[in-house]
Image (spheres, grey):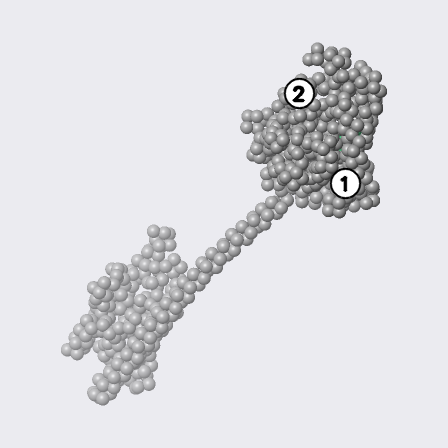
Amino acid sequence: MTNWETKNNFYKNLYLCVLSLIAIIGFSFSISNLPKENFNAQFFVLAFVTIFFSSYIRIQLPRTKIHLSFSEVVVIYILLTHGSGGAVIIAACEALITSYNLRRKGITIKNKTVLFNFLTGSNSIFLTALVINAFFFQSAITVTEKLTGEFIIILLTTGVILFLCNSIFVSIFSALKTEKAARTFWELWFNYCVNALVIYIASALLAGLAVKAQDQVNTPLFLLAVAVSGVVYFTYRRYVDDVRVTSAKAEEAERERAEQAEKHVGELQHYILEQDRISVALRESKEKFRHAAFHDKLTDLPNRNLFVETLHFALEKSRHKSGFKFAVLFLDINRFKTINDSLGHSIGDKLILNVAKRLVTSVRENDLVARFGGDEFAFILNNISNIQDAINFAERIKDKISSPFTLNGRQVFVSFSIGIAMGGSEYEAAEDVLRDADIAMYHAKETKQDYVVFDHNMHARAVTLLQLETDLRVALEREELTMFYQPIINIHSMKLFGFESLVRWNHPQRGLVPPGEFIPVSEDTGLIIPMTLWILRTSCLQMVEWQNSSPDNKNLVISVNISGKHFAEKNLVEQIKKILVETKINPACLKLELTESAVMENAENVIEMLSQIRSLGIKLSIDDFGTGYSSLSYLHRFPINTLKVDRSFVSTMADGTENGEIVRTVIALAKTLKLDVIAEGIETIHQLHQLRILGCEYGQGYLFSRPVSAADAGKIVTDQLRWENIIPKSSFVPAMQHPEFTHLRLAK
Ligand code: C2E
Ligand code: MG
Ligand code: MG
């Protein structure tokens, strides 16, 4: 029990005690003043009816548990006709019986409430009688003799006092059941009890009417009183029922509205929560998109977009803050493609991740490292004092990356090329700084340096290259390419052996452009593939034409250079086959030249492809031999026919020099591997003489002829022995008899 409940319980008991005290006084007073003559048959009939039946004719006050019964009328009637003594006893008994009746019907009524009803019933009548007597100085019986006007006032007073007593007693009792009793009392009384005033007044008036009717033994009047009472009763009953139904409906509607409102609130809350969830999800997905838009998926480093944006800021800052300098570094891992191709893409990805981790630990907090995709990374070094800071940084990167990476238990070494560009207010756009760093990086790659600082010549070169690239794209279509042919001579018989076809670009503005300038560009752009096919077809057709012109030319051989890049092309063999069919050249008269470095770059794959080419009957030659660091273990596995000694050795092969030794060794090696040897770049009789002595079989060089147009080469074809007299007859020494040659054989 809470505090207030305990307190109220006490007051309730006290209240009941007070009521009991009043009741005792009331009963004592009533019984002592009980006029015996009033207890006639009529009194007992009325008492019986009131006690046992009046409670059935009762009205419940709307929205309360307060019931008003017909007994009020009878009790007032008895009060008026038989005095307070009888009325008090009947009212008390009626209250008691009514309570028990209700309890019998299953309505829970506590004993205290039964006692309270009993006390209220008697006390209200007793107090009303006291007031009436006090104000009108009359006994109840004499009242009936009063004039009608005064009688009505007495009736009204009776009704009001009875109402006040009853309603106040009930309200106090009910209020004591609640925490804020005083407020509840007032609310109960005002909201629910005041309505009952009309019943009490009506009851009093009815009782008065009954008294008057009986008094004057006026049967119609009595009947009228009964009829009016009936009408009033039933009208009120209906009114009360209506009110109850209406209020029930209103309550129902209100409940429904409340439920509806609650449902709406629920839905609204759900909707708001949903909206919140959606907006959070939207925000998150926006952030994700933003992050994805500015970050690399694999390494989570900033990507090119974020890098360029940051670069914009750095550039802006350098414009507005004097002395602020920054550098952009562009890093590319060397031979990453080889790692990717040989070890697989997942290891390639792991390598990139590990490189990224090392790079991240190399930059300062306000610097930026980004991944541009593939094996390209870029840095912004903010607030540096000079280019040396950037160079020192590149050195640091070199140290970081030089230790091997362990990937799936395998150690992988990585080298890189870095281009460095110093940013500053002289740059107009962020992309320009990046472009220059990129150009410097390419320069580093070309020159095989770890890093290169950008200078303006590089840019000019890059622009020229770009122009060259643009022009080259249309050169094929416009048939600006043309083939030149350089004769290859059998330097023992001094007879024409064949030609090497060498491409030239007849540039509309620049004239003849040498292949050294545009072949690398065509390799970078992939133009080399269609270009080589054109070269191969043109050269074969040319050779077939010469061969068909005379039976003497049947064995002439045409050598065509094939770029290393072409070996990445899977269907190279198919393309060659097609050209053989198209041009009808005898495959034995076609020789393909591959540079040593191209062959060595991807030796295992190349061996397989070369075997397929050889199976077509085509001959193979390794060009520029001696410059590509051939591994001897590979060399004997290559299905080749010829080694071409690089021009750089031949041109400087004076007696006893190192290069002379190299040429000598290459020739010996070729002999051991049963390969032909062609010496390139023979420019002097002396070189020719030496090569002949060393047993070199074939030669090519300006001494015989520069590369010439097809027309001029055609003239050479018709005069194949034109070099017969280049060497005085006396110096013709059969190679096998020459002492040097003997020495070589001995050396072998
Ligand atoms: P290469 O295949 O080694 O060609 C020989 C180069 O040496 C030719 O230069 C030729 O003109 C030059 N040469 C020949 N004899 C002498 C000499 O006595 N002295 C000097 N100084 N040079 C001599 P070219 O035509 O400029 O070709 C350079 C390189 O370009 C070629 O070297 C070859 O690797 C490449 N190339 C030329 N034409 C083609 C082609 O049709 N396809 C491909 N893929 N590459 C080609
Ligand atoms: Mg060549
Ligand atoms: Mg060569």
Viewer can see residue 99:
yes
Of the pair 556 and 333, the residue shown nearer to us: 556
Give the residue at mark 2: 674
Viewer can see residue 362:
no
Q: Say which element carries label 2.
A: loop
The amino acid beneath tag 1 is Thr
Q: Residue at x 38, y 70 (%)?
A: 250
Which residue extends farthest left? 41
Q: Say which element carries label 1.
A: strand
> Image height check: is 277 above or below 638?
below
Q: Residue at x 45, y 58 (%)?
A: 266
Residue 576 in the image: state x and y as whole percent.
64, 37
Give the residue at mark 1: 482
The amino acid beneath tag 2 is Lys
Q: CA gap, disc 2 to disc 1?
A: 35 Å
Q: Residue at x 77, y 26 (%)?
A: 495
> Image height check: is 227 above or below 122?
below
